[in-house]
Amino acid sequence: MAKPKLMGVVNVTPDSFSDGGRYLDPDAAIGHGVELVEQGADLLDVGGESTRPGAAEVSVGEERARVEPVVAALAETATVSIDTSKAEVARAALDAGASIVNDVTALRHDPEIGALCAERGATLVLMHMQGDPRTMQEDPRYDDVVEDVKAFLAERMEVAVAAGVAEERIWLDPGIGFGKDLDHNLELLRRLGELRALGRPLVIGTSRKSFIGKIDGSPVGQRLGGTIASSILAAAEGADVLRVHDVAEAAQATRVASAILG
Ligand code: HH2
């Protein structure tokens, strides 16, 4: 198993599903990011808008105000990705030193992000989501979830390339928990290897997500074991980047797993 990169989550929001409000203050967010790097994060994903089901929309001005100072400070010492679906926020974050744009709508909300990443030579993460955050958990349906997600990601990659993004700069993410029921999430994780055929690095975010609670009834603050199990199995199936809140524990788990599997 190749040791995956760890993407540490820095949510500068009042309402993220697992840590909303803890790092809304810029100094708290910066301190948290620094701590995650010390714990072994290879990159930091800074976000100013929650994507949890039913989350309130945030204006461009507010989202920029939340993320800009945090990105500027953290980019001095770390690789920073900006978790946004708005080109204006992405541009401000790239100006402040971010080098990756993580767009959970895969250029559907704001196609301008494609041209922006092309112009700046930024890496672009394209994630699968069925529906939008307001409605995505209302009875999601697929013919074959892995085939459907794979076709979607292939199509969004074509859109990004048509906008000028170099294929080598694209990462793909099946979007665990975004318009998927428990069986969909489990099937995607079980058959993650099939997405390798797309030929691009795979990002996986299972951290603290509700599918873990659906398996064992755990509340959001007690899903570390499930996060580690799912992240390591994903890495063994070929995930290249693990998006996690608990970096120290994930770093130990990936070290041990890659020592065993070689
Ligand atoms: N998950 C979340 C947010 N952004 N980006 C990618 N590429 N993949 C993911 O799985 C993913 C993501 C949700 O987690 P979190 O940021 O902790 O919560 P919230 O959206 O409520 O801020």
Image (tube, rainbow, N blue to C red):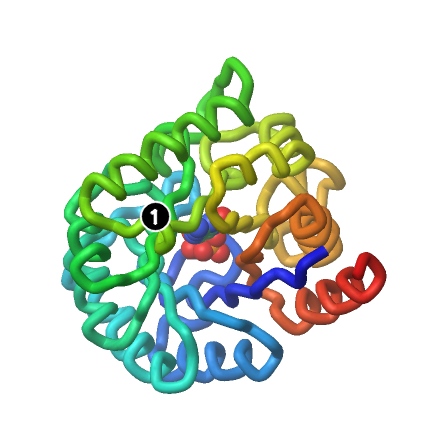
Horizontal placement of 252 versus 72: left or right?
right
Above or below residue 154? Residue 208 is below
| Point 50% across, 50% down: residue | 201
Q: Residues within 10 Å of mark 1 (few under 14, many from 20)?
A: some
Where disc 1 sits, the SS reads helix
> Amino acid under label 1?
Glu
Residue 52 location (% of width, % of height): 43, 45
The quadrant of the picture occupied by the C terminus is bottom right
Residue 242 sits in quarter: bottom right
| Point 30% across, 71% down: residue | 98
Horizontal placement of 89 versus 235: left or right?
left
Horizontal placement of 29 versus 49: left or right?
right
Residue in front for this viewpoint, 200 or 49: 200
Above or below residue 172? Residue 185 is above
Horizontal placement of 28 versus 2: left or right?
left
| Point 32% across, 58% down: residue | 101
Residue in front for this viewpoint, 222 or 32: 32
What residue is pinned by disc 1? Answer: 167
Residue 241 location (% of width, % of height): 54, 57
* Residue 28 seen in the current view: no
* Residue 234 seen in the current view: yes
Residue 152 location (% of width, % of height): 39, 29
Residue 125 location (% of width, % of height): 38, 51
